[in-house]
Amino acid sequence: MLQQIMENICNYFVEERICGQFTIADGMISLPILDGQKFLIEGSVLNDGVYTWHEDGITNDDDTEAAGLQDETWAGTICALAVPPAVIALSAEIKAWVESYGEVVRTPYTNESVLGVYSYTKASGGSGAGGAVTWQDAFADRLKRWRKVCI
């Protein structure tokens, strides 16, 4: 979810770009970053994305499961990230919101009833299917302070 949020706001909170030749062996990569720091792999065929560095293993962008980095050597960029704790906390809220309302967003209807006569109310006001409110709509005000202009 964190990576989707950063894509949506066009801001990966890049602290430092490291360009060069990189090798992932046995699911690990040697990086000059702090334990618990997030990083972005770009230019890889198999491993592009946001991860969290730990000395005992790498986790995916939301720190919940093993990243499963695949062994690979490539020329590209690894960005050390400085994601604000408030963004990480908001990411957890958004993830919970999506788990609660994700199915509702996928339908073009907000209310259906069959009380002798079939009727429905069409969703409106959002950018989702049929105007349903998506997580991007629901959290836009809280995310806007970190949004960057996409070129």
Image: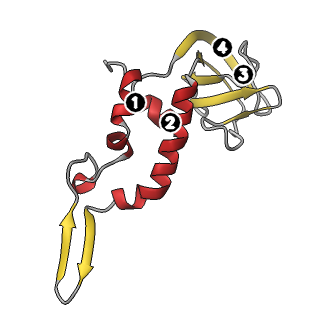
Asked if labels 3 and 4 touch by Cβ distance under 8 angstroms, the answer is yes
Q: Which residue is mark 3?
A: 23
Q: Which residue is mark 4?
A: 21
Query: Gap in Å between the C-alphas at discs 1 and 2?
Result: 9 Å
Q: Amino acid at mark 3?
A: Thr
Q: Could you tell me which quadrant the C terminus lies in?
A: top left
Foreground mark, 1 or 4?
A: 1
Give residue 32's position: percent from left, percent from top: 73, 12
Picture residue at 22% right of the left edge, 52% below the top: 131
Foreground mark, 2 or 4?
A: 2
In the image: residue 137, left or right of residue 101 = left
Query: Gap in Å between the C-alphas at discs 2 and 4?
Result: 34 Å
Q: Secondary structure at mark 4?
A: strand
Give residue 106's position: percent from left, percent from top: 34, 58
Q: Which residue is mark 1?
A: 143
Q: Amino acid at mark 2?
A: Leu
Query: Gap in Å between the C-alphas at discs 4 and 3?
Result: 7 Å
Q: Which residue is mark 2?
A: 90
Foreground mark, 1 or 3?
A: 1
Picture residue at 43% right of the left edge, 30% below the top: 7
